[in-house]
Image (cartoon, rainbow, N blue to C red):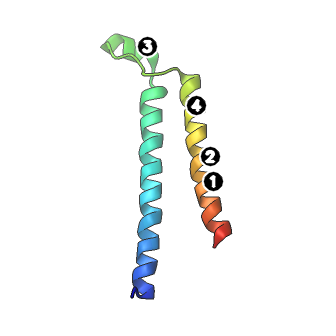
Amino acid sequence: MMGQTLFTALIALFWVAEFAFAGVVVYWFVTQGFSDEEKGAASGVKPLESKSFTRTSLLMWGGFFLAIVLLIVVGA
């Protein structure tokens, strides 16, 4: 049987992992999608997608993480 301390630690680990993953997603979108196109053209690297598509994708990810947090908070 799992003790209360271990359960609390696992919940904390879950939240840390969730926010770390969200940070990676935000970092990826910001560095890839919002990169300066003029700077990229000079170095030969082209952005993977347009800024508007990146903004839409980032908002969808934000909504996803917000829904997870709300489901956990409301369900608790």
- CB atoms at circles 1 and 2 under 8 Å apart? yes
Task: Give percent across and percent down for residue 50.
Answer: 52, 20
Q: Quadrant of the C terminus?
A: bottom right
The residue shown at (64%, 67%) is 73
Task: Give percent across and percent down for residue 31.
Answer: 42, 32
Circle 4 residue:
55
What's under tag 1, amino acid-wise? Ala
| Circle number at residue 38 | 3
Residue at the far right in the pictured view: 74
- CB atoms at circles 2 and 4 under 8 Å apart? no
What's under tag 2, amino acid-wise? Gly
The residue shown at (35%, 11%) is 42
| Circle number at residue 63 | 2
Circle 1 residue:
67
Q: What is the crowding at mark 2: few (fewer than 14 residues within 10 Å), some, or many (at least 20)?
A: few
Of callouts 4 and 3, the N-terminal one: 3
Of callouts 3 and 2, the N-terminal one: 3
Q: Secondary structure at mark 2?
A: helix
Give me the C-alpha separation between circle 3 and circle 1: 36 Å
Q: Is residue 25 above or below residue 1?
A: above
Q: Secondary structure at mark 3?
A: helix
| Circle number at residue 6 | none
Q: Is residue 32 above or below residue 6?
A: above
Task: Give percent across and percent down for residue 61.
Answer: 55, 42
Q: Quadrant of the N terminus?
A: bottom left
Disc number lying in front (3 or 2): 2
Give me the C-alpha separation between circle 4 and circle 1: 18 Å
The residue shown at (47%, 64%) is 15
What's under tag 3, amino acid-wise? Glu
Q: Is residue 75 left or right of residue 37?
A: right
